[in-house]
Each structure stands twice: as structure tokens, then as C-alpha cells.
Image: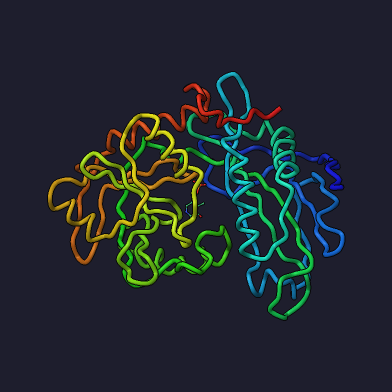
Amino acid sequence: MVDKTINVTLTKDKKEKPAAEKLEFGKVFTDHMFIMDYIEGKGWHDSRIVPYQSITLDPASIVFHYGQTVFEGLKAYVTEDGEARLFRPDKNMQRLNRSNERMCIPHIDEDLALNAINELVSIEKEWIPTAPGTSLYIRPFIISTEAYLGVAPSKSYQFLVILSPVGAYYKEGINPVKIAVEDNFVRTVKGGTGEAKTAGNYASSLKAQELVADKGYAQVLWLDGVDKKYIEEVGSMNVFFKINGEVVTPALNGSILEGVTRNSVIRLLNHWDIPVAERKISMEEVHQAYKNGLLEEAFGAGTAAVISPIGELSWQGEQLIINDRKTGNVSKRLYDTLTGIQYGTVEDSFGWIDVVK
Ligand SMILES: *Cc1c(COP(=O)(O)O)cnc(C)c1O
């Protein structure tokens, strides 16, 4: 029997909350955090909400050396009436367990984790910023804590949830970005860890990102790790192209991370009777569509930006200018609908919202 009680210790000195216009991404953390331990033989235990604090780990902890760790990312939003809500958090917990599976980390009880997130957000409700476009970012993660330098799954872990108030992603309105198609570095390959949200994928993407940032690009477009031909993702977002009336996104193939936003976009497009296909799509095909005047829109999709229109793709020395560098109609409609559902101005007809009590 899993013990589902969460012990709560409240802080005695609350921090000052930053002004809405000063908010950035992921730099300020709230007053409390959730933590739970795992030891082989005993399982997950001692779930608790405590004042936000440093954690102490043995320098030999497996997480520092071999990166056995997973994370998630979702947000809490507040409506005009002051209701705190989460967007499809069950999807994040399911994905956390899929990542756990790949990384040999013991499964967590998804209901317990959802309760923990709800209770933590409820305690920190005043930390959810109210200015338009702002939100409270939720970062659940699991680290391997056994002190052992052998390459083997850890026998002990910690699951933590921390919260960070974040500013509006688009401060001057939704804005198309410049993207460089990456044909040297790859993010991952089929059989690798691309479909898990695990630290190493992000560490290995830094170099490509750093090189293109110097040339004024916001992100890289990743191609498949075998032929460097087929499109995978854009930065840490899933990617969509609208070609001749049909929206196409790369099919899940073992190296692509399955986004909650990606899934929501596909559901909305289906609902609107806009043709959408999950299939292999090559950069060659996108280029051909561009030359034929059929590349109508391109956009990234992920929790942070929701929808990030692509205004320019740089590939093999050529600049593909998409929709005159303007946000396309489908991109705009998706953005408005998803954020509307999140902030409570559009009806949640899919049952995607969890109200925090
Ligand atoms: C988190 C993530 C996404 C987007 O997932 P969402 O659930 O929509 O936020 C896409 N690609 C990568 C590599 C990611 O890490």
C-alpha cells in the first residue's frame, strides 16, 4: 500500500515576489517545494512539502556522473476570477513515467504526483502572476542519488517539484523567429534517448544552439540523426508545417519527444476539420513546397511559447522566408485558442483543465 499523505511544513519567512514586468524565465523560485525519496526495497516514501531549500548530495551521486535523471515542464495559470488551473497535467505525469522507463528510474504513482503538484500550487497560489501572458512554471524532476561510480541504475532517488513565476513569452505580441536548419550536429537518434525528457539530450544540444545564436538565429531545426534528411524538432519544441492547406508534423519515431502541446494542436486541427498528418517529412520536401509557393506556415509548439511561428528557415546557404515573416492564420488561431483555454477566456470543451483547489 502506497502511503499518499503529504506532510506539509510551511516557511516562516516568505520571500518578496518580483514585479510582473521584471519576470524572466526560471530564475526566481517560490517559498516551498515538494520532495519524496526512493530507496530500493522500500519504494517511494516520505512525501512532503517543505520550505524551498538547497539539497545536500554525496559528490559520488550517480546523477552528477552519468546523468540518470528525468524532468517535466508544465504551467499553472490564473483566470480573471482568480481561479488557479493546470493544463493537462496528467499527460505530463504519464510522460514522466515513460521517461523513467527509458532511464531505468522506478515509476512514480501518477495520482500521488498530481496531488503533490495540486497541493504545492495551492499553497503557492499567490505566486501565480496575474499580468497577461504570465504563469507559474512547474518543474517536476527525479535525480539518482546513490553514491556509486559504477555505471548502473541507482538504488536511491529523489523526486522534487519546484515552481518559478515566469514572464510573458511574447512581450510585444506573438513574433515569428529565424531558425537555422542544423546539418552538422544531431539531437538524438532512434534507439537513443530522444523520446525521454532527460538531461543529456539538452546538454548535447547546447553546442549547436550556441553556434547559431551567434549568427542571430533563435533556435536550430533538428534533422534525423541517420540521414540528416528528415525533420525532427525545432529547439526543444515539436514542429509543424502547413503545405498547400495540410498541416504536417513529423511522426513519432523514437527520437522525437512527444509534446503535450503537439498532441493538443493535432486535436484542435482535427476538431476544426483542418487536414493534419503525422508522417516523415524531409527538408527537401519543405524546400520544394517553398519553391512552388505552397509552404504557407511553419511553427514550433511547446509549453513555454505555446506556438512559435517560424518566419525564416536557413538551409544550405538559402533563406526560406515563410508567410512574409508574418504569423499565419492557423498559427494565430492555435495560439489564441490554446492560451484562451489556459487562461479561461475560451471554453474548455476538451476537458483539458484541472482546477487547483
Ligand atoms: C518538452 C519538450 C517538447 C514540448 O513538449 P510540451 O509537452 O508540449 O511542452 C518538445 N521537444 C522537446 C525536446 C522537449 O523537451
Most extreme residue toward the bottom is 150
Estimate the x, y position of residue 264 in percent, counting from the top left.
46, 38
Residue 262 image-quadrant placement: top left
Residue 268 image-quadrant placement: top left
Could you tell me which residue is drawn at 78 percent across and 63 percent down? 56
Number of marks in the image? 0
Most extreme residue toward the left is 292
Q: Is residue 168 above or below residue 46?
A: above
Along the line of sight, which residue is nearer the eye, 69 or 352?
A: 352
Estimate the x, y position of residue 311 in percent, counting from the top left.
26, 47
Along the line of sight, which residue is nearer the eye, 317 or 353?
A: 353
Most extreme residue toward the top is 81
Could you tell me which residue is drawn at 84 percent across and 53 percent down? 45
Q: Is residue 7 above or below residue 197?
A: above
Give the position of the C terminus as an image quadrant: top right
Could you tell me which residue is drawn at 79 percent across and 65 percent down? 156
Q: Is residue 244 above or below residue 141?
A: above
Could you tell me which residue is drawn at 30 percent across and 66 percent down? 229
